[in-house]
Amino acid sequence: MLTLAVTADLHWGLRSTVDEATRQLVDDLRRRPPDVLILAGDLGAGEDFPRCLQLFEHIPGQKAFVPGNHDIWVTLDDERGDSWSVYQEWLPRVGGAHGFHYLDHAPLILPQHHLAIVGNMNWYDGTWVDLARWEPPDDFHERLRDMRFSRGRHNDARFVRWHLTHEQFTQYAITTLESHIETALRQVSHLVVVTHHPAFRELNFPNDGPITLDGMLWQAFSGNRSLERLLERFADRIVVVFSGHTHRARQGRLGAIEGYNIGGDYLWKRLLRFTWPEQRIEASEFHP
């Protein structure tokens, strides 16, 4: 039997109450260490990122992570470079120094269990906007471009600085993940998929209430159709999907694929334990 423990959105260093819930989560992992620990992004901005990883150094077993959008935020004079340099160079180097496998660069193969863990940060390209259910205002496309809500802008517009458009990075992420899936399936029979931004819409913010401008913009800035199509191609090989980002615990399906949004918010954290091949899920919450 194999046990995976998956968490996300720890936001280490944001405030003391956030950190206390994370410490409780780490203590639980020390008491019941999994075979593999997976962190699904938004771990800590800037120098809080390595401080977050350091918390898990004494947890035995293998460790892997995907970054979140907060993890690639940079300042104008950031000595690490732009967000692309942070994503491609700084994060994997820091992760490796703390014993973590960087899933955005390669799958984690577990041949003895006939299983591989694949995934990446994932991104958004506006394709989740449901114009069939809603008539947008005249300035909607300008709001999409500027990432401008009814009040304020998405922080990614301020702190994600690189040479790519959202569409270009989304395509890069999907193409890379497709390559990792094909590499993994030449070695094992089944996959666990981990992303930061929701992998499919049933794992995103609930969309069953009144449609609002800001609600539709959050849909636009959360995921993409390309990953859904990629997952559908390999549905018979995917055991489970885990995502984060929304801070909302959700369970959903994309056809035959079962998925979980891990959940947990700034003031409390959530950990999912998944056992293979039984495919059993156990959820734990941690409150300061």
Image (cartoon, rainbow, N blue to C red):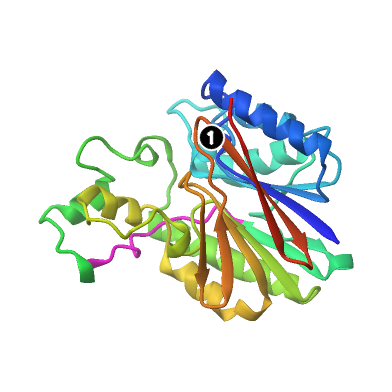
What residue is rendered at 46% in x and 70% in y? 226
Check residue 202 for magenta coloring.
no
Closer to us: 277 or 99:
277
Closer to us: 250 or 36:
250
Closer to us: 19 or 175:
19
| Residue that protrudes farthest toward the top in the picture | 16
> Bounds of the magenta span?
120-131
- Tell me which corner region of the image, top left, top right, bottom left or bottom right, holds residue 241: bottom right
Question: What percent of the width, then of the height, locates residue 136?
Answer: 15, 59
Which amino acid type is shown beneath numbered disc 1? Gly
Check residue 126 for magenta coloring.
yes
What residue is rendered at 63% in x and 54% in y? 104
Please tell me how crowded label 1 is: few (under 14), some (14-19), or many (20+) other residues with Cα within 10 Å. some
Look at mark 1 in the image and give the residue it sits on.
Answer: 81
Question: What percent of the width, then of the height, locates residue 12?
Answer: 59, 28
> Please, what secondary structure does the residue beneath circle 1 have?
loop
Q: Which part of the image, by quadrant, shows the C terminus?
A: top right
- Tell me which corner region of the image, top left, top right, bottom left or bottom right, holds residue 161: top left
Q: Which part of the image, by quadrant, shows the N terminus?
A: bottom right
Is 287 rendered above or below residue 233?
A: above
What residue is rendered at 77% in x and 67% in y? 278
Question: What percent of the width, then of the height, locates residue 138?
Answer: 10, 56
| Label total for image | 1
Q: Main secondary structure of the magenta part?
A: loop
